[in-house]
Amino acid sequence: MRSPKPVEWLFGNPASALVLTILAATGLIGWFLGQVPFFLAAVGVVAGSYAFRAANRVNAYTAWKREWDAMGGARRASPPVPRRIMLGVAAWCVLAWLAVDSASDPAMQGPVALFWLGSAALVVIAAVRWAMKKRPKPQPRSMPVAVCVSGGAGSPSVASAMAALPAHLTSFIAREPLSS
């Protein structure tokens, strides 16, 4: 896997991706309210979506790089607590406080409703992702043959095996081998 481009590292780091996504959302809400021109809202949405894709690419590369480095026998470091989640929760708390604070203003009723709808959508998406997540398969024991092959029912005795053979094979087996 190739390393992301420097622009992707810049736009894809959690802080700038969060800022650009918030700017895109506020630009879109501002355009919806008629306070921001369409062009600025469109530029904000394009920048926010690029930042989101760049963040996904950077996260995929860092996860792949962590796995690649662990193949050399080095101890696999546990993945760090995602800063983007901590930043996202902090930003959501600030925005929720602002939404609760400005809920009584009639001009802010639309953005507040959009904020709570978006929050509910994020909770539903997270719940669906968690429910659809692939669970790790159980690992086989250290002896795969013990797992793949059962013990078997046992072998018949020589007398019962000889009795079960057809007559033409019994006479063939009963002969003495030729000595040379």
Image (tube, helix red, strand yellow):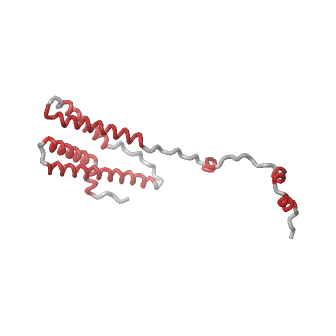
In x, y percent, where is residue 29? 18, 42
Q: Residue at x 23, y 34 (%)?
A: 96
In x, y percent, where is residue 153? 72, 46
Q: Residue at x 28, y 51 (%)?
A: 12
Task: State the residue in front, 158 or 57.
Answer: 158
In x, y percent, where is residue 135? 46, 43
For residue 162, above or below residue 134: below
Task: Tell me the quarter of the image containing the N terminus.
Answer: bottom left
Residue lying farthest bottom?
Answer: 180
Task: State the residue in front, 118 or 94.
Answer: 118
Residue lying farthest top?
Answer: 104
Residue 38 appears left or right of 147: left
Q: Residue at x 82, y 50 (%)?
A: 160
Q: How many marks?
A: 0
Task: Tell me the quarter of the image containing the C terminus.
Answer: bottom right
Residue 128 appears left or right of 53: right
In x, y percent, where is residue 11? 25, 52
